[in-house]
Image (cartoon, grey):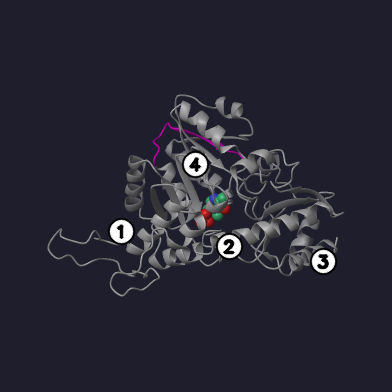
Amino acid sequence: MKIETKTIHAGVSPDPVSGAIMTPIYQTSTYVQEAPGKHKGYEYARTQNPTRDALQNNLAALENARFGVAFSSGLAAVDAIIKLLSPGDEVIASNDLYGGTYRIFRKIFEKYGIRFHFTEMAETEDIRKLINKNTRLIWIETPTNPMLNIIDIKAVCGLARERGIRTVVDNTFASPYLQNPMDLGADMVMHSATKYLGGHSDVVLGAVLCSDEALAEALYFIQNSSGAVPGPQDCFLVLRGIKTLHVRMDRHCENGRAIAAFLKNHEKVEKVYWPGFSDHPKHQVAAAQMRDFGGMISFTLKGNRFEDAHKVLSNTKLFALAESLGGVESLIGHPASMTHAAIPKEEREKSGVVDSLIRLSVGIEHKDDLIADLEMALGKL
Ligand SMILES: *Cc1c(COP(=O)(O)O)cnc(C)c1O
């Protein structure tokens, strides 16, 4: 089945009681048993919920995985993945990570004796140097946030597999419509469904997808034991959002392409980061592992002044100044003072998050209106 059909049909079936075509929101905390221990597979709603099951199965299908495990947020999914590890274990991660992922690694899990190494992952050699006998997991985020670097998923997963190290890809930026890491050798795919999957900026949810049964069992155990489960209403909202994922993503990509080209030619703009440009250092890798290049774009201003970035950010009318991404509406953000404020200045500048860096999540409005909005805001400089 093609992904455009899976978004709508995978994992869902009409309600057996009423025939309702939409998955019911099973808003219940428990299930009545016929006799002690005799039940329909549902005992308590932290452990199982039919709305959540439908979402988990749908997400697994979209990523060509066998199992889906949903969590109350993307970070709860990150939390569950790191809880697979033990004190003394080491993780190698890309250095241009989502700020919250960096924060949970450094501020929560280091306390429990897990070590994290950060590297560019531009060359597999960079990773090879950090591998030792304690390395258990390689954490890949691609395209990266907010620099839109591209990591070669197949190359990194191949290297990890040789050494018996697990891999996970945070596929939030690309969404399963643009990129399927399991097909490229990843052991797990992680999503913040808060972004493109939900797609309407109205829900926070996360998931981990995998195909290894023992790994899935371990994740379900953590899901139930730690209890960071999504509610049925939230699962429903994400299921509904996913039904139009492919249509939305096509428009995000089309608008992204037009806006990247507009910015590249603008006199006030220094540099535009977007993997669709043929001069992006990893354009060929992006073209090979992604269906299209997405609607996330970052750019810097000539002179690299904080005040200029703030002027642009406070003058757009359609691009709303907000954290997050992946919704139908366009958003504009300033990584240095917003999403990446948790990362020390020195550290963030090493990876390119300078003072004038502006990040766009291009929505699905008409591209002419979006370009006019940016033109107007840049005209204030
Ligand atoms: C938003 C985001 C997360 C965290 O997800 P939440 O749903 O906000 O907890 C993780 N990774 C990436 C790439 C994100 O954009």
Question: Where, by quadrant of the figure, is residue 258 drawn?
Answer: bottom right
Say which residue label 4 marks: 183
Mark closer to the chain start, 2 or 1 = 1
Mark closer to the chain start, 4 or 3 = 4
* 4 or 1: mark nearer the eye: 4
Q: Is residue 85 magenta?
A: yes
Query: Can you say whether 156 is above or below 132 in the image?
Result: below
Report the amino acid beneath label 2: Val
Query: Can you say whether 362 is above or below 187 in the image?
Result: below
Mark closer to the chain start, 3 or 1 = 1
Q: In the image, what residue occupies the spot 36% across and 73% down?
A: 20
Res 325 seen here: no
Mark closer to the chain start, 3 or 2 = 2
Q: In the image, what residue occupies the spot 48% across and 46% down?
A: 189
Q: Which circle marks residue 247 in the picture?
A: 2
Residue range in magenta is 84-95
